[in-house]
Amino acid sequence: MAYINGIGTISPQNTLLGHEFLEPAVEHTGDFLKAVEPVFKTYIDPIAARRMSRLIKMGISSAKICMQDAGISMPDAIITGTGLGSVEDTEKILAELTVDGKFLNPTPFIQSTYNTISSQIAIALKCHEYNSTYVHRCFSLESCLIDAILLIGEGSAMNVLAGGIDEMTMNHLTIIRRLGIWKREAIRNLDLWSSKIPGALAGEGSAYFIISGERNERTYARLEAAETIYKPGSVEETAASVTRFLNGNGLSHEDIDLVMMGNNGFEEHDSICEEVVSSALPASARVLYKHLCGEYHTGSGFALFVAAGILKKQHIPASLIVRPSPPKKLENILIHNHYRNTDHAFILVRR
Amino acid sequence: MINPIVITGYGIVSSIGMNAGEVLDSLISGHSGIGGITRFETIHKGKLPLAEVKLSNNELVDFCGLRSGGNYTRTTLLGIVAALQAADMAGVNSGQNLRTGLILATTVGGMDRSEDFYPLFLENPSKGRLRDVVNHDCGDSTEKIAEILGINDFMTTISTACSSSANSLMLGAELIRAGMLDRVIAGGTDAVTRFTLNGFNTLMILDKEGCRPFDENRAGLTIGEGAAFLVLESEANALKHGKTIYSILSGYGNANDAYHQTASSPEGTGATLAMKKALEMGDLLPESISYINVHGTGTQNNDLSEGIALEKIFGEKVPRFSSTKSFTGHTLGAAGAIEAVISLLSVQNNMVFPNLRWSTPMKELRIRPVTELKREAGVKHVLSNSFGFGGNNSSLVLSKYIS
């Protein structure tokens, strides 16, 4: 059994420790939902922090917040999921490369390596244990969770620090906007579901979790399983995979009280998400959350933070949109995320 | 060991060969793949060596029998070559109803195309061909290769710098042990890019003469490119389906040096831990290791730190060891899997391969690498090290299969 015993989330919402659970919602009117940064020097030695890019600082800070929340000082494994790693550093090098093939500053090159976040956390904690990084679109965080569950299941770790992190930059946003499924102009995030401007709204964030083999007084929820499905042939096939996933974990669709929906504002894909849930989970209440965090590869980390909080507090924050109506009980939550309707990922959490 | 994980297929492409047979021939004849830069324009041409796969992207498309215009990055193309070989060898598509996964490791992903896109894009944000940048992320290679292999039960992508593909083999074994999959094609692929060449150059760790692992006068690594994949399954599954078993993955360990983002600790802490974990898992005493395929990049820092770790674990009796990066260059995210295949070739052919370009012992170490091919070498267990930036250190043990 795996449990979520601590969470550290840096997101476009006020999710740092000490804030009310997603209330009130933070409004964003910029091109994308930018993460609300903590005071980094609270978590990182200011001298070390000076050379670190923003993503690395977010990663270390949220990992430390997570450890603090779990009340542990050393994890038995560190695993990070990131779709793109440090985009800022990668772009710096690509920009310098264009100037006759040479660049002078090694720091962005070092930090552009995808495993920098996991390894900087290891260095900060002096943790010599298992350390890995998954870099597969919207399977990145789910792969971490699967790995964490394996490590706990075989008894080689008791507390795994696992998280998902991605950042957005203006250059990257410009590129993905040209791909056509993103909003071409800024809107107010809280208007995502009513906006007439088509497309998804980009976001970013970092969410780390202590996945533990033991339940304790800090436990948020039980992390039952995660599943990744590549390019299902149809809505029916995706729905069948969901049913198989639930059955494989001893549950039926009636047991799922709440589905955290993969909808992101791109209508063509949102309707597929709705159809999958209508088919596989007709009785479950649906929660829309991406108006709070935006769309990014590891956005399911924000969803897992939300789902774990709902199960612990037995309360759904008003900033989330629940349809058709809040469920009578809050025992089992299924999180759905997808990348352009080709990669579908699911996480099952229980009270 | 309960539920042994065995290898039933493997594929490899590198500067010393387009398949395992060619790679073995090069290892036997002492033919290194390190040479001049020929494939792309750079100010480093004629000054820095590389270990290139000589085929162009179009030639790789033909080599794999793919239709042209498939929008593959070089990283993906190299991966396709090796993954197809591995899958064919293990009969992955022979119709059994087995849950099969693909785990790919890479450090650059589609960077070879992003670096074509960016100059145009930075001049004018509406310029640059989108088809050059949609493959930028690492997951793209995995999905393209999975589609070619017809795998959709499970897939993921790992990036832990130069230990990446050792970790993909570890995860594959774990997924099989846990009963989540019956069979996994695991490995890694990386193409040489201007991004990596220039990046490593700013760190001043590229040897202008080609890498000289474990030599006193070593001056850095040589970047290489390539890919390798291995097909893993449980022994029970392999026997049930009448598969040929080429080797056992008898141990693996992953640890972190937690010392510095790019430098290895002077004590070789992470390296020692990774090797110890791998030996413990395989229930092996240090003296049972017949050969170590060391990480041996040829940098001052790695070879010293790794050497100290070897002396710490093996004491006076350090087994025969060599760095085959002196043949293949440092293939970064592919290195763990490429060297796992080379370790398997060592087990299968009962040979220890030489460490090229070595002449002077390191003054800090007692040990020195094997510099000539050893035949009939009594190879039973091979330890393969893959250590990366970020202190990501992993070790594998590949063993002779005795039914």
Image: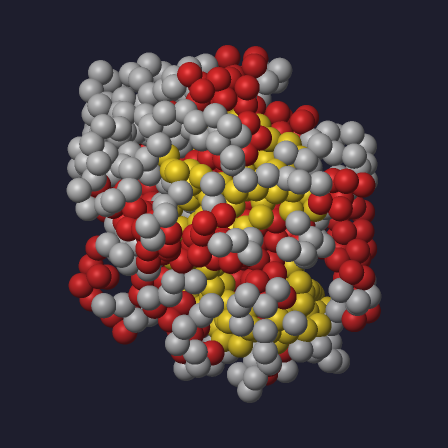
- Could you say which is closer to the camera, residue B326 or residue A263? B326
Residue B15, given in percent of the width and then of the height, sits at: 42, 21
Quadrant for the N terminus of chain B, please: bottom right
Residue A118 position in % (x across, y down): 40, 57
Numbered label tally: 0
Q: Where is residue A258 in the image (x, y as percent from the top left)?
A: 70, 69
Examine the image and state in which quarter residue B86 appears. top right
The C terminus of chain B appears in which quarter of the rendering? Answer: top right
Left or right for B367, reference A260: left
Q: Where is residue A120 in the image (x, y as percent from the top left)?
A: 33, 58
In the displayed structure, does residue A289 sit left or right of residue B256? Answer: right
Instruction: Using residue B390 as the reference point, say whether residue A48 is left or right of it.
Output: left
Residue drawn where x is 61% and y is 49% of the image: B173
Q: Which colour scheme is used?
A: secondary structure
| Above or below B343: residue A238 | below
On the question of residue B312 being in view, the answer is yes
Q: What's the residue at 50%, 22% (across, down)?
A: B24
Identity of the residue drawn at 54% across and 23% down:
B20
Q: What residue do we see at 71% from left, 77% from top?
A: A331
Mark yes or no: residue A31 visible.
no
Depth check, front residue: B314 or B330: B314
Q: Is B268 on the left-hand or right-hand side of B96?
A: left
Residue B394 against residue B337 in the figure, above or below: below
Q: Nearer the viewer, residue A67 or B217?
A: B217
The answer to whether B367 is drawn above or below residue B132 in the figure is: below
Task: Tell me where residue B99 sits by quadrant.
Answer: top right
Instruction: Determine the residue located farthest toward the bottom in the rendered image.
Output: A217
